[in-house]
Image (cartoon, grey):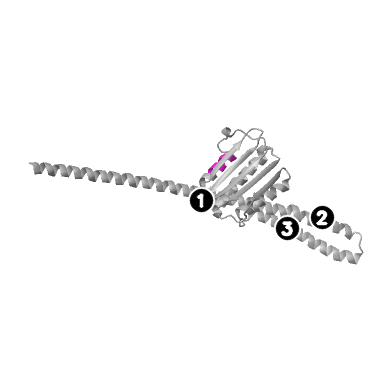
């Protein structure tokens, strides 16, 4: 009788252990599947945001090059042609013919530059490294003469993934655009400090500031936060009314 009881107890215990193991296994598989799905969604979201950032950056770079060709070089050649036309009227007939040919060739060059500038705006180009991209953006803004802006960095060659560098550039660019649109600042400073583990970036302005608790969904600041989360970067914004704004970005190189 006792042996039967022992067998029953052992069987029940074994059954409970097996059920427990099955339950733990099912919970583990479910949790693992959930984590894998979440990671997959995160990776897809990152790739989507990266693709969007690449398109935005290339479009802006192409627009910049196109405008430079059209406005700067094109305008200079147009002035040269205008001056040449003035000189043609003062020359003899034989000299006029030679200069007229040059004038026509110059006109073709001007038209080619205009066509090229339009083409560049719609084509793709390779983008630059992070430091050089920031410097080019700063130079572009300087030409607008809307405010004084400086970029301070000790290193030009930043050891960072090109994909993550692009996301960081878009955050910086979004911050600068917000300053131009809303801050009424006269001075902007961008500083970048790089070491083996972290990349620190600060963007400071002396504008009118704002209440950081009133950030609206869909705003430029929200876009910056979302992009920072994609690469596990830390983003903080400090601002006071009439005291300017400082945006701090910390990128951990060895985190991913």
Q: Please, what secondary structure does the residue beneath circle 2 have?
A: helix
Q: Which residue is mark 3?
A: 113
Look at the numbered discs 2 and 3 and tell me whether their residues touch, using CB distance below 8 Å.
Answer: no
Q: Position of residue 231 (x, y in %)?
A: 52, 48
Residue 225 belongs to the span the image colors magenta: yes
Front label number (1 vs 2): 1
Question: Could you tell me residue 98's position as x and y percent?
Answer: 85, 66
Pointer 1 or 3: first along the chain = 1
In this figure, which residue is indicated by the disc labeled 2?
Answer: 79
Looking at the picture, how far across and down is residue 155, in whole percent? 62, 54
Q: Is residue 45 left or right of residue 86?
A: left
Q: Nearer the viewer, mark 1 or mark 3?
A: 1
Give the residue at mark 1: 47
Query: Label 2: how many residues lie within 10 Å, few (<14), some (14-19) or many (20+)?
Result: few
Q: CA distance from mark 1 to mark 2?
A: 47 Å
**What element does badge 3 sit on?**
helix
What are the residue bounds of the magenta stretch?
220-226
147 left or right of 166 in image: right
Earlier-in-chain disc, 1 versus 2 = 1
Of residues 105 and 142, the one nearer the viewer is 142
């Amino acid at each position: 009788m006792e042996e039967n009881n022992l067998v029953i107890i052992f069987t029940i215990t074994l059954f409970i252990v097996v059920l427990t193991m099955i339950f733990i296994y099912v919970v583990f598989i479910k949790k693992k599947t959930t984590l894998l799905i979440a990671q997959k969604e995160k990776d897809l979201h990152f790739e989507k945001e990266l693709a969007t950032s690449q398109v935005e950056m290339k479009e802006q770079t192409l627009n910049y090059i196109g405008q430079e060709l059209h406005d700067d070089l094109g305008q200079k050649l147009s002035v040269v042609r205008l001056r040449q036309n003035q000189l043609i009227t003062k020359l003899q007939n034989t000299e006029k013919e030679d200069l007229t040919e040059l004038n026509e060739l110059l006109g073709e060059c001007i038209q080619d530059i205009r066509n090229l500038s339009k083409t560049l705006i719609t084509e793709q180009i390779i983008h630059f490294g992070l430091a050089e991209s920031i410097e080019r953006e700063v130079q572009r803004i300087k030409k607008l003469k809307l405010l004084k802006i400086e970029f301070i960095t000790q290193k030009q060659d930043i050891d960072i993934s090109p994909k993550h560098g692009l996301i960081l550039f878009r955050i910086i660019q979004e911050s600068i655009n917000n300053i131009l649109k809303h801050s009424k600042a006269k001075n902007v400073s961008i500083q970048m400090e790089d070491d083996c583990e972290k990349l620190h970036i600060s963007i400071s302005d002396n504008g009118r500031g704002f209440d950081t608790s009133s950030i609206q969904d869909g705003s430029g600041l929200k876009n910056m936060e979302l992009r920072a989360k994609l690469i596990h970067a830390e983003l903080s914004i400090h601002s006071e009314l009439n005291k300017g704004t400082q945006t701090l970005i910390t990128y951990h190189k060895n985190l991913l």
